[in-house]
Image (tube, rainbow, N blue to C red):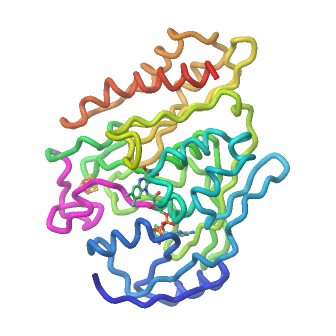
Amino acid sequence: MKNFQIIRTLSSKSAVTTIAKESSAMFIAGGTNLVDLMKKNVVAPDKLIDISGLDLKQIEFLTGKVSIGALTKNSQVAEDKVIQEKYPLLALALAAGASQQIRHMASVGGNMLQRTRCSYFYNTDMPCNKRNPKSGCGAIGGSNRMHAIFGASDSCIAVHPSDMCVALAALDATVFVEGPKGKREIKFTDFHRLPGNMPEKDNTLENKEIITSVEIPNNNFSKHSHYLKVRDRTSYAFALISVAVGLDIQNNTIKDARLAMGGVAHKPWRLTEAEEFLKGKTVSETTFRQAADLAMHGARSYGDNDFKLTLGPNAITEALTIAASK
Ligand SMILES: Cc1cc2nc3c(=O)[nH]c(=O)nc-3n(C[C@H](O)[C@H](O)[C@H](O)COP(=O)(O)OP(=O)(O)OC[C@H]3O[C@@H](n4cnc5c(N)ncnc54)[C@H](O)[C@@H]3O)c2cc1C
Ligand code: SF4
């Protein structure tokens, strides 16, 4: 690991001003992903701008929405009683991620910007278009059990590994950022991107921008929400497939539905067609199975991950069934 310098900043404005002057600098929050990447020489910044001391750690319940500071720890959000009551999907997704120790260090902004867990990306001896553009993709035709079944390209079939982000995509969150050109907001579902022919770019954040907060509008899904995570171990493992569900059910009829999947694409994968199908339908296993089959249209596997084509609809059906029965 290369030597580096740490610069501490105490406001988002000074963080942006400081990073704008540097040619090889990165923000560091909890460090739970970035330090691993540095140890493996996947990234090698000269300077780290430490933003962990910024005053962006509040969870504020405002009229019609909640605002969560980008430096709020994953554990703080997951354990917040009002989040658990009003946005249980978010609390469940966060609690399903990593381990309690990592959740104590990991920040909301860092979670959104964590890199893929594709093993070729972490191995600098292997080809990887995401780490080293135009070097090839080791996973296509290689070991790809964890990889994408939706939205992949000939350049990259990696998935975004976050659990929290799947819930935020389902809940129509908005990301607030600040950069040298000022402040702006990005719809959560537009924040992460598909790989196309530029897999090195995970998201739509511009160079030198900092995430300051995330907002979630109030919803009617608190009674019938579920986050189902299928993984190799019941703890401390990334999702093979996950499903985030929010249902608004009145008199056994689905008034509104939200559905998103993790572990299947380069970004949290929102299932809007299946959501539309569910609206107005009576709760039943047949309806849930039909929605799941609809959601899987266009899925494509790459060998080791063929099982996801069967696991996917089963997981969606089960997540819907559990959410409806709460
Ligand atoms: C063993 C292990 C298991 C894990 N399991 C899971 C899991 O099951 N599910 C899951 O979802 N996650 C899992 N994680 C990932 C973990 O959630 C992330 O590492 C963590 O959320 C990253 O947050 P951080 O604050 O530590 O980010 P850092 O490591 O500090 O930063 C990550 C990236 O974000 C950038 N950054 C951080 N904050 C900001 C900001 N506010 N604005 C702009 N850029 C910023 C940094 O420059 C860096 O590029 C696991 C991690 C480990 C090590
Ligand atoms: S899937 Fe993406 S991250 Fe993995 S080796 Fe291919 S280009 Fe790299």
Percent of width and height locating residue 308: 31, 31
Task: State whether residue 120 is above or below residue 267.
Answer: below
In front: 274, or 282? 282
Looking at the rendering, in which quadrant would you find the C terminus? Answer: top right
User: Quadrant where the N terminus lies?
Assistant: bottom left
Residue 161 location, x and y as percent? 41, 50
13 magenta-colored: no
Where is residue 102 shown, x and y percent of the image? 47, 60
Q: Quadrant of residue 171?
A: top right
Residue displayed at 58% across by 26% down? 275
Between 293 and 237, the one lying in front of the other is 237
Magenta residues span 114-140
Q: Which residue shows up at 30% across the image and 61% down it?
A: 130
The residue sitting at 29% across, 43% down in the picture is 146
Q: Answer with left or right where residue 312 lies relative to residue 321.
A: left
Q: As drawn, which residue projects farthest toward the right? A: 63
